[in-house]
Amino acid sequence: MDPVALRALVPAVIGVLVRRGADFASAEDAVQEALVRALQVWPEDPPRDPKGWLVTVAWRSFVDAVRSDDARRAREERVEAEPPPGAVSSVDDTLRLYLMCAHPALTPASAVALTLRAVGGLTTRQVAEAYLVPEATMAQRISRAKARLVEVAGDGLGQGQRDLGMVLHTLYLVFNEGYSGSVDLAAEAIRLTRQLAARTDEPEVAGLLALMLLHHARRAARTTAGGRLVPLAEQDRSLWDTAMVAEGVELLQAALAQDRLGEYQVQAAIAALHADALRAEETDWVQILEWYDELVRLTPSPVARLNRVVAVGEADGPAAGLAALAEVPDGVPRRTAVAAYLHARAGETGRGAELYAAAAREARSTAERDHLTREAARLREQLRGSEA
Amino acid sequence: MAKYLLLKHYRGAPAATNDVPMDRWRPEEIDAHITFMDDFADRLRESGEFVDGQALAPEGLWVRYDGEGRPPVTDGPFVETKDLIAGWMIIDVESQERAVELAGELSAAPGADGRPLGEWLEVRPLLTAPEVTAG
């Protein structure tokens, strides 16, 4: 059985254990144990009914854990603290799992880790590798997150906008982590968002899925073989995945038709307009700017305002861009890089080079730092050429 | 085997033989440098000598305890004259000679005009647990 299909079973198996009366934290632990066991045993001895196998092994592991003397009292207390099974039965088990793993009481890092394990069916080791931390650290982060959920169990868990918003934010964070270690987190985020979108017709869920697909479609063009970043304007657009773009656009159109706009739909609309341009020069910056105006109305995020500045620079020229930049506070990540770009576009090559060098010092990733340093070097080379 | 830390400095080390800031190199010289660094780490992974490598942002601050119930005191950003670490690589090698040999290779990374950087790298042995037979 392929590992993704195996992982797709995990939320349902946790659901079965919870319905049989296990508390979430113990059920999740037991399923994790069954999963690790499946990864060891199945390659040699594949089961006929994978889900039934997981349920049996996980349930046995849960019962063993409950029986264990050391753990009994703690677990009994936990069971008492849990809401009775069936209390929220109107909500689909898997959807409920998403909401629980991204509970507002959890920190974003905990919500990410718990979502990847309980909803995504990744092992603790895989999550740890993806986030470049020791396995013991990740195990502890997950168990503390579950303990926190037990503490807040009485607060209830709705299907409210805010709770779903936390789920979407968590999936967005996973997507942005990209690819590191042994797990393709961007692809995993897409899988989990797709699974969520099948369970709700909330347009922001479709909007987030569209946004992910439209960005993921550019993946092959985004870096060179050597890992060097290629800016959007310089990407070889023939490398974009047109089928993925088409799916993203279709999802977005259906979401927009519901007429309940949100920030993910708007960001997807911007990505779709970029995808629409066969060459960078054909980009419809005027329409992109209109969407950015919408985005800035929807979210107070200074990052959205900074990205809008780039669109102003393209739609109305670098001078207008620089005027708009003055409204964005210092200290917003990448502000210096945007300033460098606009000054360079305005023909102030020396100033652009200085700012790119400064932006490289502020960069938070090596790929970005190297890109900005290269831009500074490119402008300085131009300067030397024009002096000679 | 013994572990060594190879430390690279933004500032504070003696001047490199080819001492030109990176943003004043030609773009293709930057690419050549990055390729060299990536290949170097890959080669050590191949040989079973690589442990870890990280780059650090140049910004940071000093922090110290300031008494019960008070927030820590901070001081920063760093002043221009301060010694500043740019990154490190930890290697696990047979001997100090091998550590020095590898640091020498790393210091030869290409820089401006494609010539070796010749930057000074700090080579520091990591302290280990005592050997069982030492007691």
Image (tube, rainbow, N blue to C red):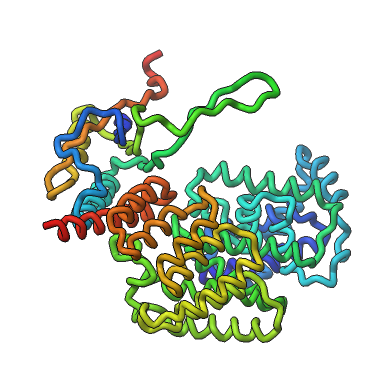
Residue pictured at 66% horizontal, 76% vertical: A197
Give the residue at the far top of this rendering. B135
* Of the pair A97 and B8, the residue shown nearer to us: B8
Task: Identify which residue, A284 or B70, lies in the foreground.
Answer: A284
Choose between A272 and A3: the one closer to the eye: A272
Quarter-of-image position of residue A147:
top right
Residue A267 % position (x, y): 56, 72
Q: Is residue B36 above or below residue B50?
A: below
Q: Is residue A103 left or right of residue A184?
A: right
Residue A35 appearing in the image: yes
- Residue at 76% across / 41% down in the picture? A71
x then y, percent, for residue B88:
34, 37
Instruction: Describe residue A186's horizontal placement relative to residue B45 as left or right.
Output: right
- Picture coordinates of residue B107 (x, y %)? 20, 38
Q: Position of residue A231 (x, y in %)?
A: 37, 66
Quadrant (top left, top right, bottom left, bottom right) of the C terminus of chain A:
bottom left
Number of numbered discs overlaid on the protein picture: 0
What residue is shown at x 31% (from left), y 59% (from top)?
A: A348
Q: A275 above or below A308?
A: below
Report the residue at 61% width, 50% height from top.
A109
Q: Is residue B43 visible?
A: no
